[in-house]
Image: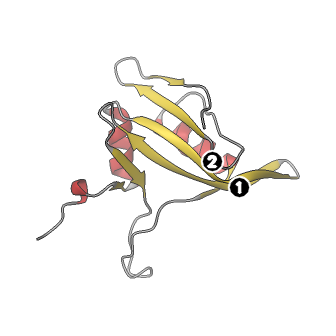
Amino acid sequence: MAWESTDLDIATEARFRALAKSGYRIEVLCLEAAKKKGPTYYGLWVMRAVSEEGDQKRLVTARTRKTNNDIKIREFKTAAGVISFLAGLGLDCAKIPLHEGKHARHKLEPAAGVSAADDLTG
């Protein structure tokens, strides 16, 4: 049986952007507590897109020959990297959880192009 990429719980960056524009909520999950080094916060964050029905797609890196076409969850190691990615999706604000196990929700409003961020939740 051949699997379509839409059958899996993953999404490449292009698909992830399309999901955000179609109304999926974007969640930033903190896997490793943030630590401040100089002016930068370092930690470990991943993202997922979640539909109103609860369908979840985790953001993955593009597959290349160098990685033997392995699928790898996209990890962000700096708060600036998370902000940059969210801004690239069209969000106008970014909430980033700083403690392991916490997550923050964002939603791009398709009609108005205005984003909203929900409170941090655990």
Q: Residues within 10 Å of mark 2 (few under 14, many from 20)?
A: some
Q: Which residue is mark 1?
A: 43
Q: Is residue 4 left or right of residue 116?
A: left
Q: CA distance from mark 2 to mark 1?
A: 12 Å
- Residue at 40 percent across and 42 percent down: it is 49
Query: Mark 2 or mark 1, which has the lower sequence index?
Result: 1
Q: Nearer the viewer, residue 64 or 94?
A: 94
- In the rendered image, the vertical position of residue 53 relative to residue 35, given as above or below: above
Q: Quadrant of residue 22?
A: top left
Q: Which residue is mark 2?
A: 101
Residue placed furthest toward the left? 1
- In the rendered image, the vertical position of residue 103 relative to residue 15, given as above or below: above
- In the rendered image, the vertical position of residue 113 relative to residue 71, given as above or below: above
Q: Which mark is residue 116?
A: none
Q: Nearer the viewer, residue 72 or 52?
A: 52
Q: Which part of the image, by quadrant, shows the C terminus?
A: top right
- Residue at 50 percent across and 40 percent down: it is 27
